[in-house]
Image: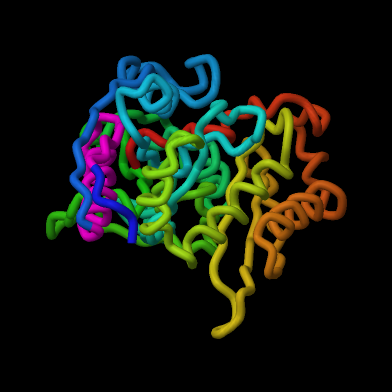
Amino acid sequence: MTRQLTIRLATRGSPLAIEQARRVAGRLEEHRHRVELVVVETMADRLVDVPLERISGTGVFVKEVQAAVVRGVADAAVHSAKDLPSAPELAVPGLMLVAVPERADPRDLLVGGTLRGLATGTAVATGSARRRAQLANLRPDLTFSGLRGNLARRLAAVGNGPAGAVVVAKAAVDRLGWRPPPNLVTEVLEPETMVPQVGQGTIAVECREDDDGIRAALAAIDDPISAPLLAAERSFLVGIGGGCSLPVGAWARTGAVGSEEVVLTGMVAAADGVAVLRHEGTGCDPVALGAAVARSLLEDDGATGLGGWSPVGGSHSSPHSTSPESTSA
């Protein structure tokens, strides 16, 4: 049993980020640790009205939170996993991903109608290229507009102004306890229809590599089922690789009952949604599986022919290394 500690958790200040940090704190308190939250404002939080593609650099939702741990202001950082860059070259020296608590629902939620029931020309508000491309592929008659802000701001946009519907992460509304009013139609989009973002619904906790006590405390809340699923999705994103500027998604789940198999669906789409490519693989090594699914999409399924692609092997500067949709939902 690890010794009892006081653990300072760094987190963004959005309602969802605070709730996620509180959930991590609750798990640590079950192990009799004392937890304090350290709220950090990120650049993306300060520039809430600026489209994410115009904010330079990657890690716009995590850099300042990570810096608080590096400086010793906090002992660990709590992130939405989809915000955390996956490429090794973008890792912060001295920090390591040490805990992945139990994953929430990774699916997307359409608010304002059903996919089949939306009227022709309905404007769907989303800041996510991944969501936009897959919706455009399914419903070419829809129109799209950008939308940033916390969950409350996104949901309030439905029916107010040009947005007839929005798409958010189901995990976000579940964690914040949101329930639609009686007159508001919603639909959960199954992963077979809308492949989720890498890490969607998952919390990732980092700490300093040399802090053995904190590492041991956090390791106790690492979920043995969720951690391999995240590893497979992040490996897929790394395998898609340097310079990909196209919509990307991945969905990992457990395989056969009683086995250690992971099933992974990877997705790459043309930016306009005209083409959406998917590939599914199964394996017991999640990192190798993610790389294999990415390789199949690149080499066998024609992903490099979609356009918007620079040679694999460059800096992983794609907006998908830090999700362009990770505005709290």
Pick the quarter of the image with the N terminus.
Answer: bottom left
Q: Is residue 309 within the magenta segment?
A: no
Horizontal side of 75 relative to 143 (left or right) equals left
| Residue closer to the observer: 240 or 11 | 11
| Residue at x-position 54% and y-position 42% | 130
From the top left corner, tell me how far across and down residue 123 is, in percent: 39, 38
- Residue 174 visible in the current orientation: no
| Residue at x-position 29% and y-position 58% | 186
Name the outermost residue toward the left. Answer: 182
What span is colored magenta in the figure?
A: 6-31
From the top left corner, tell me how far across and down residue 185 is, in percent: 25, 58
| Residue closer to the observer: 6 or 83 | 6
Quarter of the image where one finds residue 278: bottom right
| Residue at x-position 26% and y-position 35% | 8
- Residue 58 visible in the current orientation: yes
Horizontal side of 91 relative to 52 (left or right) equals right
From the top left corner, tell me how far across and down residue 15 is, in percent: 21, 37
Quarter of the image where one finds residue 238: top right
Question: Taken as a whole, is the magenta stretch helix, strand or loop?
Answer: helix
| Residue at x-position 61% and y-position 43% | 248
Pick the quarter of the image with the C terminus.
Answer: top left
| Residue closer to the observer: 117 or 76 | 76
